[in-house]
Structure formats: C-alpha cells, structure tokens
Image (cartoon, rainbow, N blue to C red):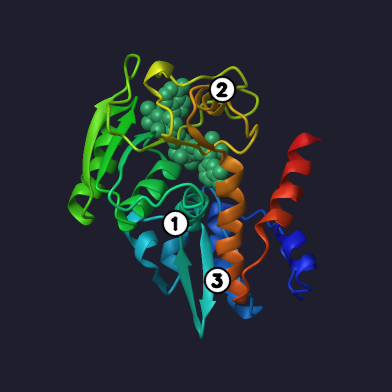
C-alpha cells in the first residue's frame, strides 16, 4: 500500500518490513538512525517500549503513551501515533467531530488512539463501552484528566441502546475481523438512527456486519479501510512532506484483501 503511493508519486523511497524481536528493539532503532532512515512504523509488541529509544513524542502519542510511527526531524527521531489521526482523516470526510457526542466501543490500543484524537479535535462527550471494566475505566480517566472531553464508562454486559442525540458511533473492538465474519456488536440496531455517522476500525473485511446494519438503518457508514489507508497517508506526509493520493493506496489494499 505504501510502496504503491511511492511509485505513483515518483518518490525515491522504499518501505521494507523487518521482524524485530523485543530484546533487539534498541539495536533496531540505533540501526535506523545509523542508516539515515526518514522514519519507520512499528507495530505490536513495540508500540510502548519503542518510546524509550526515541528523542521525543508528538502531542497525541504522549497522551496515549503509544507510538506507531517514528519520524526523523533534524537529528531527532520523534514518535507519533497515526492510527487515531488516520481515523480522524477518514471520519472528517463525513463529519467534523467538534462539539459532537460519541459512543465508542472498545478500550484497547485502537480505541485509545481514536478517543484521544476525537477529544483533541473537540468532541465534547465520549461514552466508552467496554466489556472489561478496568480497561474501560483507564481510558475514561485518561480522557477526563488530560483532555477537555467529558468521558463516561458503560460496562458492556448486555445489549446496548445508542442514546438519542449521539452523532458518531465507533466500533474500535476486534469484533468482525477476519475470520470472525459472523461477529456482531451486541447493539440494538433500531437505535442506529438515519444520518448518524457509524465508523468501524475493521479493515478486513471492510463490510462488517456492523457496517451493513448501519447502512440498512440509513446511517453514514465509514469502513476500517479508510483508517488504514489514511494512517498511511499521514505517515508518508510526516516522512516525505508529500500529500499522497489515498485512492491509489485504497485500491492496492482492496486488491490484497480480496485475494
Ligand atoms: P486490543 O486487543 O488492544 O483491544 C481489543 C478491544 O476489543 C478491547 O476493548 C476488547 O475488550 C474488545 N473486544 C474484543 N473482542 C470482544 C468481544 N467479543 N466482545 C466485546 N469486546 C471485545 O486491540 P486493538 O485495539 O489494537 O485493535 C482492535 C481492532 O482494531 C483490531 O481488529 C485491529 O484490526 C483494528 N485496527 C484497525 C486499524 C486500521 O487502520 N483500520 C488500526 C489499528 C487497529 P476487552 O477490553 O473487554 O477485552
């Protein structure tokens, strides 16, 4: 997906995948510096531990305490988190979250990234719905103590009705991720109202059960491919300064997932 964008824009850059064991992470980051890399993505299990090897953090990465994208700025390697930024870029094609009320399902890494960016973008109310109460409470406390959004927790132990007045509903759990094609959120579909914006983080398959329910109810649905593609767009902008064409990346990743 990233190299398709590089080719399309004639950028003389390569994107290579490296498997780095946890005990060699420091060596890997020193190697990246020594080789003059313009940056790198990092995935689980390195998103938190990589911070010790970087020179600083962007605002949202500092709030989340997790980095998925390192960026060379001058002599420094700065940690950013582009997952939430990619989500926001995708969401903004449908709605500006400023002043909006959000219901967010999940409290893991993706949910934290999304919640922090929504709060920084001016969402006023964020209700976190999570099965594990302690994990949900950690995210709610973070939002209430470090951002201007008002956050509340709902423990997810029965069918959830989306309250009146909610503008944006987000699935940030792993429900529906391949091969869990039949997975469905325990939400009363009758409370998904026409015009509501409903977003899913699941990129594969993009048309999850939740997205299909939302479309059937007349909601504006945003699939997880938008987040995946746009976190790539944000990362490439950080690394190269170039705004790449998201549609080239989307077509590439769609072709990969349809194989
Ligand atoms: P985590 O393991 O950190 O969190 C998983 C979350 O899903 C937790 O809140 C967990 O609840 C909840 N969950 C899982 N299964 C169930 C279930 N059966 N019922 C209720 N809740 C459930 O994962 P991540 O946050 O890192 O990733 C979540 C999803 O986001 C993944 O599927 C991943 O593919 C997707 N993702 C998509 C991206 C994109 O670019 N589109 C980027 C990053 C992630 P609990 O705390 O109760 O266990």
Taking the image as drawn, is residue 106 in sight?
yes
Can residue 28 be seen here? The reply is no
Horizontal arrangement in the rendering, residue 141 relative to residue 158 (left or right) = left
Residue closest to the far top = 158
Q: Position of residue 21 (x, y in %)?
A: 60, 52
- First of labels 3, 1 by sequence position: 1
Q: Which mark is residue 49?
A: 1
* Badge 3: residue crowd in 10 Å (few <14, some 14–19, many ≥20): many
Image: 71 above or below 64: below
Rate crowding at label 1 as few (under 14), some (14 to 19) or many (20 or more) other CA atoms within 10 Å. Answer: some
Question: Is 240 situated above or below 179?
Answer: below
Residue at the image point whose x is 76% and y is 50% from the top: 252
Could you say which disc has been placed on residue 203 in the image? none
**Front-most of residues 243 and 235:** 243
Query: Reading the chain from its start, which is encountered first: label 3 or label 2?
Result: 2
The residue located at (54%, 27%) in the rendering is 215
What residue sits right under mark 3 in the picture?
A: 238
Task: State the separation of the CA atoms marked 3 and 2.
Answer: 34 Å
Position in image of residue 177 (x %, y %): 59, 30
Looking at the image, residue 153 sits to the left or right of residue 218; the answer is left
Q: Is residue 37 left or right of residue 160?
A: right
């Amino acid at each position: 997906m990233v190299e398709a964008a590089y080719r399309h824009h004639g950028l003389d850059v390569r994107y290579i995948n490296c498997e780095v064991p946890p005990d060699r992470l420091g060596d890997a980051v020193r190697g990246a510096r020594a080789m003059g890399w313009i940056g790198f993505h990092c995935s689980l299990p390195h998103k938190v531990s990589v911070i010790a090897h970087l020179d600083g953090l962007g605002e949202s990465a500092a709030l989340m305490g997790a980095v998925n994208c390192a960026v060379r700025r001058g002599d420094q390697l700065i940690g950013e988190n582009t997952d939430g930024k990619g989500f926001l870029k995708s969401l903004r094609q449908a709605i500006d979250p400023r002043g909006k009320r959000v219901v967010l399902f999940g409290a893991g890494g993706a949910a934290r990234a999304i919640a922090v960016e929504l709060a920084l973008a001016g969402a006023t109310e964020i209700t976190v719905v999570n099965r594990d109460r302690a994990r949900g409470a950690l995210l709610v406390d973070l939002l209430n103590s470090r951002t201007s959004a008002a956050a509340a927790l709902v423990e997810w132990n029965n069918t959830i009705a989306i309250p009146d007045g909610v503008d944006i509903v987000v699935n940030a759990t792993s429900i529906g991720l391949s091969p869990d094609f039949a997975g469905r959120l325990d939400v009363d579909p009758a409370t998904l109202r026409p015009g509501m914006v409903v977003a899913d983080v699941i990129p594969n398959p993009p048309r999850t059960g939740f997205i299909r329910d939302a479309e059937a109810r007349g909601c504006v649905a945003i699939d997880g491919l938008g987040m995946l593609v746009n976190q790539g767009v944000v990362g490439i902008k950080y690394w190269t300064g170039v705004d790449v064409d998201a549609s080239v990346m989307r077509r590439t990743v769609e072709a990969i997932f349809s194989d």
